Image (tube, rainbow, N blue to C red):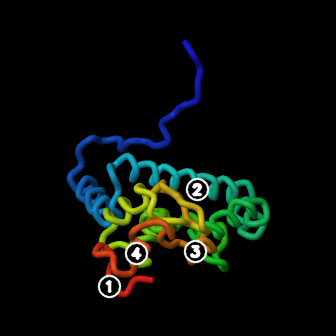
């Protein structure tokens, strides 16, 4: 038996059927154009890990927010760089994050919010078909986390047919 790394980066819900949870998940899938619930569960697991790390740092500092912020400086800086936390937020704000805060930083959502696509699903298609660049580099991963300083550089690839302002799939008033 081989002892390789675990390839599952998410946890499934404990109870297979809970009508309210299923309806909430379906709403998030539609609102953010996710392919399946696995993508949502991956974001929820990532958020769970962030909260766990923040609680650990706060616990090690015995509730002293300043000492915890000093110990977890790189952790907070990474979340601020990703745009998940604001510049003035500290480590205790990690505990109040929602899964939507992570989903908003996905390339697919950024493309949709910038108005480069009509729907989140279309944004996903544009990204996966190679029509979108970040900092001039073509990216084909809809789940890529876009850093706050990269957000302004998200645009159509110059060689893409969608770069033409007259393309029928371009939304009105796009860049």
Dot 4, how many residues are within 10 Å of its Cα: few (below 14), some (14-19), or many (20+)?
Answer: many
Give the mark nearer the N terminus: 4 vs 2: 2
User: In the image, which disc is placed on residue 153?
Assistant: 3
Which numbered disc, 1 or 2, marks the residue that appears first in the sequence? 2
Q: Which residue is mark 4?
A: 116
| Distance CA(mark 3)–CA(mark 1) | 20 Å
Residue 61 vertical position relative to residue 65 in the rendered view, above or below: above
Q: Residue at x 45, y 49 (%)?
A: 42
Q: Residue 50 shows which numbered tag?
A: 2
Q: Nearer the viewer, mark 1 or mark 2?
A: 1
Q: How many marks?
A: 4
The mark nearer the N terminus, 3 or 1, is 3
Q: Position of residue 26 (x, y in %)?
A: 26, 57
Location of residue 118 by image quarter:
bottom left
Q: Indicate which disc, 4 or 3, sits on the residue closer to the N terminus.
A: 4
Q: CA distance from mark 4 to mark 3?
A: 12 Å
Give how far apart the Cα atoms at labels 4 and 1 are: 9 Å
Q: Which mark is residue 172?
A: 1
SS for callout 1: loop
SS of the residue under disc 4: loop
């Amino acid at each position: 038996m081989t002892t390789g790394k675990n390839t599952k980066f998410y946890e499934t819900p404990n109870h297979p059927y809970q009508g309210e949870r299923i309806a909430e998940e379906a709403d998030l899938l539609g609102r953010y154009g996710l392919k399946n619930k696995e993508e949502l569960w991956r974001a929820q697991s990532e958020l769970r890990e962030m909260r766990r790390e923040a609680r650990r740092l706060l616990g090690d500092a015995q509730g002293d927010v300043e000492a915890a912020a000093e110990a977890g400086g790189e952790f907070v800086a990474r979340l601020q760089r990703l745009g998940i936390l604001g510049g003035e937020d500290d480590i205790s704000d990690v505990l109040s994050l929602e899964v939507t805060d992570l989903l908003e930083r996905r390339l697919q959502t950024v493309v949709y919010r910038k108005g480069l696509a009509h729907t989140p699903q279309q944004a996903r298609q544009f990204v996966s078909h190679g029509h979108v660049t970040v900092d001039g580099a073509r990216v084909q991963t809809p789940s890529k986390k876009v850093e706050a300083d990269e957000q302004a550089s998200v645009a159509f690839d110059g060689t893409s047919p969608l770069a033409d302002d007259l393309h029928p799939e371009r939304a009105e008033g796009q860049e």
